[in-house]
Structures are given as structure tokens and as C-alpha cells.
């Protein structure tokens, strides 16, 4: 797919996502959790890396809550540069609610919040869930176009 076609597709999907109700996003978030819970990789994972969503993305809260309920560790990325981040562990969804937001509405993990946010630079989660604007029939991901996850994970 050409760069121009990807850009047009992102714009089209972005317009659709901005019109979704909170109820619809929650329904889709729950559906995604159901799909994730069917993965053998999820069942065997002791730690899960989750993205913190933009306002237009499905919420990862239900995935976090399920992880906590199953005794899994949850880590989220603290972005350092365009190609670097550190994993920060969280122990509840309320920690995320208290974080400041960036210009896209994404919570920004900070270290000063007592023991609730702990830096884990050496940790590689057993399973990592990343955002996607769209996916094709071969499960290839179309991201937001900045190339961040491609640079970080070499994808």
C-alpha cells in the first residue's frame, strides 16, 4: 500500500473513530478483551505490556483489569524519545486515571507517584498489546503513521 493510500485510510478511519460513542468504544474494547483472552499467549503470560490509549482508541482498561484479576503484572511504556521508552509497572487502573495527559489525551506515566509506578528498564513483557488504526486480513497493522512502534520493536 502506498504512503498516500495509508494517509488517506488513516484520515477516513480517524473521522469514523471520532464519531463513535463512548458506549460503542466500550463495546469494542470488551470484544477485543474477549479475543485476547482466547490467545494461549495471554494465558501463559505473567506480564503484559499495554499501550495507553488516545481519546479515539479503544480503552485498554478492561484488559488491565483482567490482567490484575488473573495475577498478571501490567507495564506501560513511558516514552523517552522517538525510538526509546522504558516500561513502568502499574498496580491499578486508578493510577492511570490520576496521570497527566499529553496533547493526544494519552496518559503520561511519571515516577513520582510513590510505589504505584515503578520503573522496570530491564523487563520485557511476555505479551505486548499495541494500538492499530486498522488491520488487514493478514493481521498486518496500520499504525498512526509516526512509525514509533516500528522503530521501537523493529517491525
Image (tube, rainbow, N blue to C red):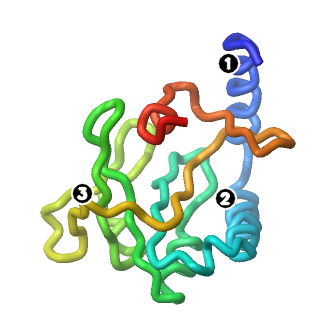
Residue occupied by mark 2: 22
Query: What residue sits right under mark 1 in the picture?
Result: 7
Query: Does label 2 or label 3 sit earlier along the sequence?
Result: 2
Residues at marks 3 and 1, CA–CA distance in whole angstroms: 33 Å
Mark 2 falls on what kind of element?
Answer: helix
Label 2, label 1: how far apart the Cα atoms are: 25 Å
* Neighbour tally class for label 2: few under 14, some 14-19, many 20 plus, Cα within 10 Å: few
Horizontal side of residue 125 vs 4, given as left or right:
left
Confirm or deny contact between disc 2 and disc 3 (CB under 8 A).
no
Q: Earlier in the sequence, mark 2 or mark 1?
A: 1
Crowding around mark 1 (Cα neighbors within 10 Å: few <14, some 14 to 19, many 20+) is: few
Labels 3, 1: front one: 3
Of marks 2 and 1, the one in the foreground: 1
Picture mark count: 3
Q: Residue at x 43, y 64 (%)?
A: 125
Q: Where is residue 106 shown, x and y percent of the image?
A: 42, 48
Instruction: In this rendered view, identify the residue nearer to me: 12 or 38.
Output: 38
Which numbered mark, 2 or 3, is in the foreground of this view?
Answer: 3
Q: Which mark is residue 121?
A: 3
The quadrant of the picture occupied by the N terminus is top right
Q: Position of residue 150 (x, y in %)?
A: 51, 34
Taking depth in this image into account, of 108 and 153 the one nearest to the observer is: 153
Residue beneath the point at 13% across and 63% down: 112
Where 106 falls versus 10 (above or below)?
below
Mark 1 residue element: helix
Q: Earlier in the sequence, mark 3 or mark 1?
A: 1
Residue 93: x and y in percent read 42, 74
Depicted 45 relative to depicted 12: above or below: below
- When the figure is inspected, residue 135 is found, relative to residue 7, above or below; the finding is below
Q: Are marks 3 and 1 in contact (CB under 8 Å)?
A: no
Is 92 displayed left or right of 142 in the figure? left
Using a 10 Å C-alpha cutoff, classify the residue at mark 3 as few (fewer than 14 neighbours), some (14 to 19) or many (20 or more): few
Amino acid at each position: 500500500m502506498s504512503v498516500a493510500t495509508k494517509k488517506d485510510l488513516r484520515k477516513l478511519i480517524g473521522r469514523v473513530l471520532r464519531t463513535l460513542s463512548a458506549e460503542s468504544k466500550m463495546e469494542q474494547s470488551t470484544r477485543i478483551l474477549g479475543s485476547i483472552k482466547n490467545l494461549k499467549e495471554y494465558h501463559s503470560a505473567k506480564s503484559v505490556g499495554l499501550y495507553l490509549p488516545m481519546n479515539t482508541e479503544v480503552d485498554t482498561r478492561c484488559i488491565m483489569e483482567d490482567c490484575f484479576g488473573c495475577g498478571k503484572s501490567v507495564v506501560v511504556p513511558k516514552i523517552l524519545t522517538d525510538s526509546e521508552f522504558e516500561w513502568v509497572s502499574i498496580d491499578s487502573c486508578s493510577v492511570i486515571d490520576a496521570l497527566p495527559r499529553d496533547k493526544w489525551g494519552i496518559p503520561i506515566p511519571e515516577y513520582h507517584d510513590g510505589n504505584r509506578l515503578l520503573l522496570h528498564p530491564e523487563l520485557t513483557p511476555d505479551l505486548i498489546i499495541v494500538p492499530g488504526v486498522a488491520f488487514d486480513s493478514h493481521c498486518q497493522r496500520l499504525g498512526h503513521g509516526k512509525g514509533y512502534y516500528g522503530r521501537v520493536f523493529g517491525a
